[in-house]
Amino acid sequence: MDDIADAMKRDPDASPRRPLLRRLLRGVAILLALLLGLLLLAGWLLQPRRAGATLLSLAGDALGLQLRAQEIDYRLRGTPQLVLRNVEAKRPDDTTALLRARRVFVSLPWRTLRSRGTDLTVQRIELDAPVLDIPALQRWLATRPPSGKTRIPVLTGGLRVRDGRIDNDDWRIDGLAIDLPSLHPQRPLRAHVRGRYLDAPLSIPADLAIAVAHPQRLLDGAHAGVAGVGTLTLAGAGWRIPAQVFLVGPLRLGKDSALMKPARIGIAARYLSGSTTAPFRLGLHGPMAFNNATWRLVPVTVVLDGDGPVPDARARGSVSVGRRLRLHLDGALAAWPQSWPALPPPLSASTSPLPFALDYSGAMAFSDPASLTLCRDATALDARFRLPEVLAWLDAGSAGSPLPPLAGTLSTPRVEIAGATLEGVEVELGDE
């Protein structure tokens, strides 16, 4: 005991040094363990396929999807970037992928990774040759649990889509390209969209600039101002309608529907078929609803301003545009077009408008039969016709048949033909 006391007298700090040494050794051991863990993590991260496959598996489990990619690469220096090639996403029990893409590029800042979902800021997203299958997407959405408010991410560097396609059971959109310079849920959105809608034999290439005043309000089911302007072309076998279009109105999205009330639509177009050219300008105003792949305007006010064989007219009724075109319009022609065959006296001397009723249900090309009633004073026409045939007859002028390609009846109290006056006239028109 005396020896120990003497040693402490000679070195009073000897006893505290042992705990200090133990703490230092423990700290070194922890540091070595951290370094080893970081080395293992770095080794894992330096194997993009293994690390990426693990991340895709975790994301797929959270979404209820099988996510696969043939090639995976990423960069962690600066702004983290992830590149996936030949990507496929599908439900485990589904034979059809809801999304496929040749390349997916995502760039997002470190603060987004550290926030664990509280910060949805993404720098840029790029998709090359994505293919979205609508039926498979709907089957997946039906399995998802109810969720709260959907949040829109912030895209500081925007979104780019090239060579995209959207497939449905009976229609598709191909050549889809989207350029979105930036996205913020509380700020106006501007996008450039190109693509071609195909529902054989109908083809509609479109090139549109679209603006949304408040994206988050739109996603929340509230009204948000939407505007679109650009070009589209309706085309079928032997005919085309190139058009410039304008659309504006407050839009509200439902679960499987959309409503713009009111919608204001302006169209400047030309009907082209063979040697027939029929320019016109069309304006529509009224509530526009979308449901079951069909746009409906009911009730709608229609104003038609035509050149050549297309008359000036104003009408009200309903318009439905989907796989088929449906019209029911009641209105009046402002005057008998000068390019139409001249009316016989006394009809030619009248300046009265010509009330009409038009009904049509058929192909977008207006190639199926339409029903028309047309009046001037006491003269009435009740007829069926096909628009391409009537336009071709008008274009033929004096070289064609003297009678229009109509089927129906014409009645008038009096008409003068070749110097003779006929009274109580009723004419049966054939379709041949």
Image (tube, rainbow, N blue to C red):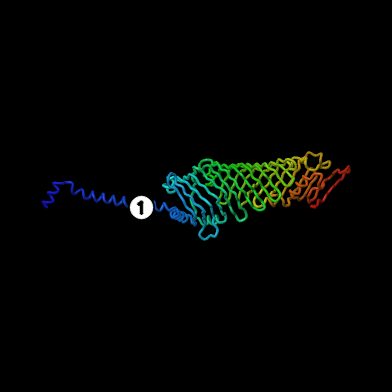
Image x and y of residue 24, in percent? 26, 49
Position of residue 99 in the picture relative to residue 335 (left or right): left
Position of residue 249 in the picture relative to residue 422 (left or right): left
User: Where 291 sits versus 209, above or below?
Assistant: below
Residue 305: in sight, yes or no? yes
Q: Nearer the viewer, residue 403 or 130?
A: 130
Q: Nearer the viewer, residue 250 or 402?
A: 402
Q: Residue furthest left?
A: 2
Q: Quadrant of residue 96?
A: bottom right
Image x and y of residue 223, in percent? 56, 44
Circle 1 residue: 37
User: Amino acid type of disc 1?
Assistant: Gly
Disc 1 residue crowd, few under 14, some 14–19, many 20+, Cα 10 Å:
few
Q: Nearer the viewer, residue 71 or 246?
A: 71
Position of residue 270 in the picture relative to residue 413 (left or right): left
Image x and y of residue 259, in percent? 59, 47
Position of residue 404 in the picture relative to residue 92 (left or right): right
Residue 58: in sight, yes or no? no
In percent of the image, x 39 and y 53: which residue is there? 43
In percent of the image, x 60 and y 54: which residue is there? 168
